[in-house]
Amino acid sequence: MLTLETAVLPVPIVELRTYLRIETDAEDALLAGLIRAAASQVETWLGRLLLERTATERFADPGETLRLTAGPVAAVSAVTLTPPGGEPAPLAEADWRLVQRRDGAAEIQLLRGVEGEVRVTYRAGMAADWNGLPEELRLAVMRAAGHLHAHRDAAEDAGLPGAVRQLLAPWRRLRLN
């Protein structure tokens, strides 16, 4: 099970307001919600987190390899084992290894057998802040938020528009299980 730290707004409201040609701050609460929704849609479509944040994953019945869901992984801060009926304790760094792939996906390889629940806490995301994201991704989030703003009452809305998907396509990570 994956738990993510709540991200800061990936797009400054003022920037989105300018993009949408909105001159007052009367809709800022709505725009903040649209930014969060657009960023979530973009992250889901990409299979990656945009802005770096802390992720915690629990593996109830771990094998030798623990595939981390959020990516790209920047660093692992803790690997903890809770044995059946026992107390959580950190696994020594000699007992696990982080393996990162070029596409940002990562896994923890357990170097000794364990029984119980393993919890991995790590940082993941493509950039530390909005300005660190590539321009195409920034524009994709803004266009997705603009689309949500323009079509907020449309029942037939089919998700991310084609232009946004085209901006995102080179950055998309596909996973085959």
Image (tube, rainbow, N blue to C red):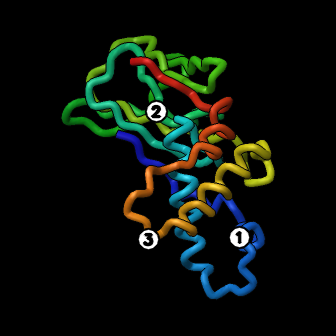
**Residue 8, x across and y down, in percent:** 62, 61
Q: Which mark is residue 20?
A: 1
Marking on residue 69 = 2
Task: Provide the residue designation for mark 3.
Answer: 153
**Residue in the picture at 71% in, 70% down:** 20
Residue 121, which numbered label?
none
- The mark that comes first in sequence, 2 or 1, is 1
Mark 2 crowd level (few <14, some 14–19, many ≥20, 10 Å Cα): some
- Is residue 123 visible to us here? no
Viewer-proximal residue, 164 or 173? Answer: 164
Q: Position of residue 87 (x, y in %)?
A: 30, 39
For marks 3 and 2, the one nearer the N-term is 2
Determine the CA span between mark 2 and mark 1: 34 Å
Residue 100 vertical position relative to residue 137 in the rendered view, above or below: above
73 lies above or below 160: above
Please, what secondary structure does the residue beneath circle 1 have? loop
How far apart are labels 3 and 1 at the CA level? Answer: 17 Å
| Quarter location, residue 71 | top right
Q: Are marks 2 and 1 in contact (CB under 8 Å)?
A: no
- Residue type at mark 1 is Leu
> Residues under labels 3 and 2: Cα distance?
33 Å
Amino acid found under the numbered disc labelled 2: Thr
Which numbered disc, 3 or 1, marks the residue that appears first in the sequence?
Answer: 1
For this orientation, the residue located farthest to the left is 85
> Quadrant where the N terminus lies?
top left
Q: Position of residue 157 (x, y in %)?
A: 44, 56
Residue 16 location, quadrant: bottom right
Give SS at disc 3. Answer: loop
Query: Of the residues tagged 3 and 2, which is closer to the observer?
Result: 3
Q: In the depicted view, which residue is nearer to us: 132 or 172?
A: 172
Taking 145 as reference, is 176 above or below it?
above
